[in-house]
Structures are given as C-alpha cells and as structure tokens.
C-alpha cells in the first residue's frame, strides 16, 4: 500500500503494515521537487522501488503538477519510461532527463536503511588502546576560530 503523507511531504510504501520505504519531496507552487528515495534494506527490490516511483509519477500527473526529479532513482526510471518526460518543465528536461552518465537501474540510487546482518564488533571495540594523551589526564579541546588550522592550513604555515 502506498499513501501520500502530506504532513511529512513523502509518499510512504507499506508492506504488511510496516513502513518499507518512502519518497521524500517538497512543494514549490505547482511543482513537486522529489529529493530522494529511501527503503529498508530487508525490502530491497526493484519491483517495490518501481511501484513506489510510478505511483508518485501517476499521482503528479493526476494532480496536474510539474515534477523536478532531483532524486536520481526517479530520473533513471523517467529515462526508461519516457511517457513521463512531459511532467518535467520543458526548461529543465535537458538538465534532468536523458543523461548517459546515470546507472541503468533506479536501485543504484536508493538510500537503504538498516544494516545488513553482520556480527557485532562491540568486543573488539573494548580492546582498543586508549591514546596516551588521554590516559595521562590530558583532555581535548576544540581549536579556536583564530587557529589557522581551522581553515585547513597546516600549523607551520600562516593563514593568509
């Protein structure tokens, strides 16, 4: 099930009652600016991503809005499904669509949340050595803004 959560400006995809992913957007007058697509790692699927992105495109078309696809996953899908190109304002089509430097599949541009199954490294972290400066009672303080190293200059070269 996909629903438009207008309060959080995102289209949410639910699988068995669980929020599986969403497409984040913002509204500017009659334009929907699509920022990114996020999906839980356990729901990683080309079909789910395509279903979610097509729902967004169809909803934009039904609402008679324009779309600004800043989301690279949406751009790659729109390159495959050229019938959605007119949703992008003509002035911006060349900037957003038909770019050969993008990957072939939208999944390559989706943000995934939740870590893959891996063993814990907590025990290993307990055995890391404590830096000598801390073990001798020294504490770290952040550099002052007047310190030339704050702007990226090495300590022995004065900032200009």
Image (cartoon, grey):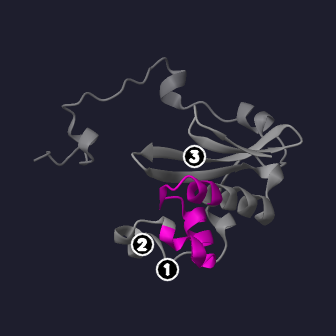
Q: Is residue 2 above or below residue 123?
A: below
Which residue is denoted by mark 1 in the rendering? 98
- Relative placement, left or right, of 99 versus 104 is left
Q: Nearer the viewer, residue 89 or 18?
A: 89
Question: Are the residues flagged by discs 2 and 3 in contact, CB closer than 8 Å?
Answer: no
Label 1 element class? loop
Question: How many angstroms separate mark 2 from mark 3 (CA)?
Answer: 21 Å
Percent from the top left, x then y, of residue 42? 83, 50
Residue situated in front as seen by the camera: 15 or 104? 15
Q: How crowded is the residue under tag 1: few (<14 C-alpha within 10 Å), some, or many (20+)?
A: some
Q: Nearest to the eye among marks 2 and 3: give it.
A: 2
Sequence-wise, which precedes: disc 1 or disc 2? 2
Q: Gap in Å between the C-alphas at discs 1 and 2?
A: 8 Å
- Residue placed furthest toward the right: 16
Residues at discs 1 and 3 in contact (Cβ within 8 Å): no
Q: Earlier in the sequence, mark 1 or mark 3?
A: 3
Q: Secondary structure at mark 3?
A: strand
Numbered range of the magenta stretch = 58-86
- Can residue 104 be seen? yes
Residue at x 46% of width, y 66% of height? 88
Q: Which residue is mark 2?
A: 93
Q: Find out whether residue 77 is within the magenta segment.
A: yes
Reply yes or no: does residue 91 show up in magenta: no
- In the picture as drawn, the residue positioned furthest to the top comes out as 137
Q: Are marks 1 and 2 in contact (CB under 8 Å)?
A: yes
Earlier in the chain: of badge 2 and badge 3, it is 3
**Position above or below: 9 against 99:** above
């Amino acid at each position: 099930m996909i629903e438009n959560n207008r309060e959080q400006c995102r289209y949410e995809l639910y699988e068995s009652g669980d929020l599986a992913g969403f497409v984040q957007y913002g509204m500017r007058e009659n334009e929907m600016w699509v920022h990114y697509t996020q999906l839980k790692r356990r729901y990683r699927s080309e079909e789910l991503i395509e279903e979610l992105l097509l729902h967004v495109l169809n909803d934009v078309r039904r609402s008679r809005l324009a779309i600004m696809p800043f989301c690279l996953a949406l751009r790659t899908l729109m390159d495959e499904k050229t019938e959605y190109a007119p949703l992008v304002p003509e002035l911006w089509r060349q900037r957003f669509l038909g770019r050969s430097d993008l990957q072939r599949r939208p999944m390559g541009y989706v943000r995934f949340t939740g870590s893959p199954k891996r063993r814990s490294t907590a025990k290993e972290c307990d055995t890391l050595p404590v830096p000598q400066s801390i073990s001798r009672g020294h504490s770290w303080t952040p550099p002052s803004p007047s310190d030339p190293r704050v702007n990226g200059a090495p300590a022995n070269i004065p900032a200009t």
